[in-house]
Amino acid sequence: MGDMSWTRANATEFSIDGGVLRVVTDASEAAYQVISSPFAVSEGMVPVVRVSGEVVRGQLAIGVLNEAQDTWLGNRSYEMGRFEDRLIFAPKGSDAITLVIANAGAGAPAELVLNSLEVSMEVPSEGGLPLSELEDQGWNVGYSAAGEVIAVGDAVTDLVPGDYVACGGAGKANHADFVSVPRNLVCKIPAGCSVRDASTTTVGTIALQGVRRTQPEIGETIAVIGLGLLGQMTAQMLRANGCTVVGLDLDASRVLRARKLGMDAGESDVDVYKALIRDMTGGRGADRVVITAATKSDAVINLAMEVCRAKGRVVIVGDVGLNVARPQFYRKEIDLVMSTSYGAGRYDRNYEENGVDYPFAYVRWTLNRNMSSYMALIASGRLNVAGLIDKVVTVDEAPETYAKLAASDDAPLGVLLRFPDDGAELAEPHDAAKITIRGSRKPLDRVINYALIGAGAFGISMLVPQMQKRKDRYFLRGVVSRSGLQASNFVRANQIEVLASDLDEVLKDPDMDMVVIATRHNEHATQVIRSLKAGKHVFVEKPIALNWDELGELVDAYQALSNPPALMVGFNRRFSPALVALREVLANRRSPVIINYRLNGGYIPIDSWIQNEQGGGRNIGEACHMYDVFRSIAGAPVASIAANSINPGDAPYLRNDNFCATLTYQDGSVGNLVYTALGPKQGMPKERIEVFCDGEAYVVDDYKSLTRASDGKVLWSGDVDKGHYEELSQLADAIHDGRGAPISFNEIIETTAASLHVEDLLFGRVIDDEE
């Protein structure tokens, strides 16, 4: 710090005293506050900036500008609290850099105290690996690939390492060195089909499914509109079916290419094409039309109607405008058919993810069998894919290739990406279940190091931001997730040290103090038990268990521990300001309370994961919140439970998201829950609580206000606050102080048991008295 010189820009206060820098910013959103003198960047070196300090108020950023001081090489924002960080940004050709302290979008003054700041020049890599990979963000690019199997799951018996396969699926068969793909999206490459040609299998299967939907018959004349890669493949497949194929593309070179590959006739002029179809069909029109073009215009679909014969069929494969003019469609009584992706099984979770195949005798052409059929066409010589590939580039050339494709009016028809085995060093083995992110933040002293288990929307968008407000207590040191891309990007964007795909990797880490479980509901109980046995504090989103067996195993595991870690379930509503204020009002009550809780949950489709075996349904998965609210207000154990549901009959509703439950408590109080998915999503608040006691009533309106009914006095009001921050804050303090969790273990188990009991009642199950 003492060797640096600074220029005050917009800072209202700035000083360096005893090696400590202090800045008070103006109220601008992003203006520079102080700027350092330039630092020369040694050739072949990377500047590394080490900082530690505290944001006393507000929010600001520390960053690095290029030599011209007109472009950020990188910056990092800091909110209120202590921090210690290492900034590593590639110089990108700059011979000098400048440090800047700036406002970070808050639009209010901020105050920063820097206790240390050091700039050094270091070699850009260690053992061939970059000092930092925080700037490396990934995308799920691509959905068609082929390569060598290196590992298979336990249930996969027909493929072994060393087999060569084609694979498909957006988000699965990505353009990457290593991919993990469900079995039904993988197909073995037959003899006679090269790996290079097999890499087009997913694209080709889209074309093949379109042909199957066309239902071509030998001797028919079929029009193909759009002769890009899909259209070219479609034309060849129809020719293999014994059809006469007439193609249209506005690019004359594509028409010529299709003709060279066997297409019977084609044109690039629409009017000439209409006349060609007329003349080749004796004025009747094409028997069938396949649309493989991509345009927002409705002209394509209406052209297809015009050139199609009466009683013919139009099949949509490409993404085109669908505003169909009625006259020809109606007069000719044309069948309009959509072709969906790769074939039967696509978008069916049981087929794609769970590996449940369709019976061969009943569903001949599943997407997997379509993949196999496509490669068989290549192997037999009936389909010439090599003639459609214009270029093969390495993955390192991909950015340049994409840029050329975007800028060119003469784009190649097919481009393959090749992933060479370049022998590049990996920080960890490719099959490692845990990696350490280079350039990550290190934890401060005396904080709770935790790992987020499940990098889904709720964990990332709700739990982590609330915990970041207590940086004095919590430090996010790791993430465990099976969604590699989303988790990987989140980890790098937030400078998190550990990324793992196996919970055991963080459980055996002695420096990991706590796990925050935000996975699907059916995984909660097992993960909680494993974490407790490993000696980790646990916060788990509700519910903690989906059935009596899971709950029993959890109780046994917890009670077997001589000194169990803290265990907390996300029953956040009892910590909301409205309910805290309500309990204060009721603290000296003389009578029991009657609680009416109405939850207008809105409709969720019955095939949603929330409703199936993963979510457990809305009574167990969400109504447990309401039972916890009853328990927190009554302050006494449950005495009895009654519940009744609607009889949905054939309607698309479920018993366990349309029901009434009544719980009585040992102090004489009663809690009534009306939970329904039958109401509107607008015009009525989701949650309303009415509490009656001692000649008075109190109303909680959607956690935005608490009102006393007798005189309308508002006892609390504010933005919607369901208590997420407060529950996590209290848990942090409890762990730090060595106290028990804010909700006792017995209450957690009681509330969970109440939800399971209600579930049994709703479905008429026999209740075991011992349970």
Image (tube, grey):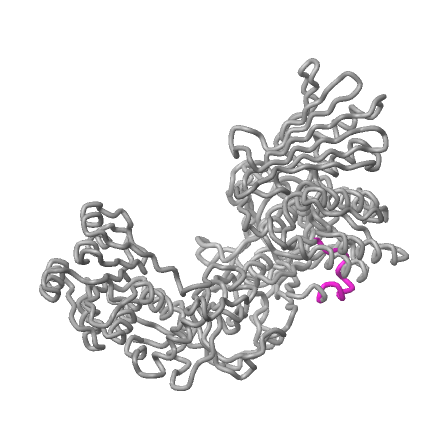
Q: Residue at x 23, y 77 (%)?
A: 261
Q: Which of 334 and 438 is in front in this view?
A: 334
**Position of 139 compared to 205: left or right?**
right
Residue at the outermost top position = 711
Q: Based on the displayed image, in which of its 4 quarters is residue 711 positioned?
A: top right
Query: x, y (%) of residue 675?
Result: 64, 36
- In the rendered structure, does residue 387 fall within the stretch colored magenta? no
**Position of 640 compared to 723: left or right?**
right
Q: Which residue is drawn at 68% across and 47% down?
A: 467
Q: Based on the displayed image, in which of its 4 quarters is residue 366 positioned?
A: bottom left
Visible residue check, residue 40: no
The answer to whether residue 770 is above or below residue 154 is: above
The answer to whether residue 621 is above or below residue 345 is: above
Question: How many numbered circles does the render carry?
Answer: 0
- In the rendered structure, does residue 507 fall within the stretch colored magenta? yes
Q: Residue at x 31, y 79 (%)?
A: 386
Query: x, y (%) of residue 423?
Result: 53, 82
**Position of 643 compared to 260: left or right?**
right
The answer to whether residue 438 is above or below residue 99 is: below
Quadrant, the N terminus: bottom right
Give the residues in magenta.
Answer: 505-516
Q: Which residue is drawn at 83% across and 58% down?
A: 557
Residue at the outermost bottom position = 191
Query: x, y (%) of residue 489?
Result: 55, 59
Q: Which of 713 and 554 is in front in this view?
A: 554
